[in-house]
Image (cartoon, rainbow, N blue to C red):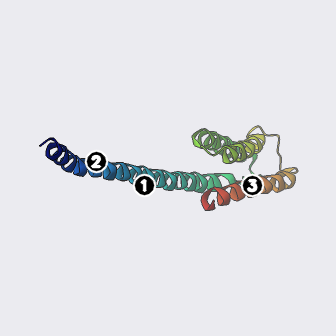
């Protein structure tokens, strides 16, 4: 009789153990799916940040109107700071801060029409760094 009781207990416990095993696999699959979703979300976040960064970093003021150039540069510098503060990618953040420092030179009036060609060349290089970082962040 005892053997029969043990057999019944084992027979009843077997589906439970199998179910627990299946739950463990389901939990692992769910966790892997969540990680995949998070990676996709991170890429979307990087993509969104990059679109904004590229749009802001291509700033080129009209140096023929110094007052307007300074006002526009001040607004762009604030946008760059805000975006840098929100950006998780440290390389992109540093690129944005580099562009911001450059734009702040225009906002302060230290870049004039006479020195604008040199500034524009340096700014173009910084813009290239932003686009390179973004292509790596989105594609990688």
Front-lying residue, 97 or 36:
36
- Residue 136 occupies which quadrant of the picture? bottom right
Q: Secondary structure at mark 3?
A: helix
Q: Position of residue 40 (x, y in %)?
A: 50, 56
Residue 117 location (% of width, % of height): 85, 55
State the image coordinates of residue 74 (x, y, percent, origin top left). Answer: 67, 40
The mark nearer the N terminus, 2 or 1, is 2
| Disc 3 to disc 2, C-alpha distance | 56 Å
Residue linked to disc 1: 33
Q: Which residue is mark 2?
A: 17
Q: Which mark is residue 10?
A: none
**Left or right: 20 with respect to 82?**
left
Hey, which residue is sitting farthest left in the picture? 1
In this figure, which residue is indicated by the disc labeled 3?
Answer: 129
| Residue 91 position in % (x across, y down) | 70, 46
Q: How far apart in space, not on screen, are marks 2 and 1 (Cα)? A: 24 Å
Reply above or below: 3 against 64: above
Marks 3 and 1 close (CB-CB < 8 Å):
no
- Which element carries disc 1, helix, strand or loop? helix
Side of 53 relative to 5 (left or right): right
Please state the total of marks drawn on the protein image.
3
Can residue 58 be spotted in the picture? no
User: Which badge, 3 or 2, comes first in the chain's sequence?
Assistant: 2
Which residue is rendered at x = 70% and y = 54% of the image? 130
Q: Tag 1 or tag 3, which sits nearer the N-term?
A: 1
Q: Nearer the viewer, mark 2 or mark 1?
A: 2
């Amino acid at each position: 009789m005892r053997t029969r009781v043990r057999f019944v207990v084992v027979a009843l416990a077997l589906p439970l153990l199998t179910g627990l095993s299946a739950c463990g696999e389901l939990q692992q699959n769910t966790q892997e799916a969540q990680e995949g979703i998070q990676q996709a979300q991170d890429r979307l976040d990087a993509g969104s940040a990059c679109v904004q960064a590229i749009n802001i970093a291509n700033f080129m003021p009209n140096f023929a109107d110094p007052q307007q150039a300074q006002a526009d540069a001040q607004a762009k510098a604030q946008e760059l700071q805000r975006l840098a503060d929100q950006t998780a990618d440290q390389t992109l953040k540093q690129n944005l801060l580099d562009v911001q420092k450059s734009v702040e030179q225009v906002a302060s009036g230290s870049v004039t029409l006479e020195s604008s060609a040199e500034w524009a060349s340096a700014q173009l290089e910084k813009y290239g760094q932003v686009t390179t970082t973004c292509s790596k962040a989105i594609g990688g």
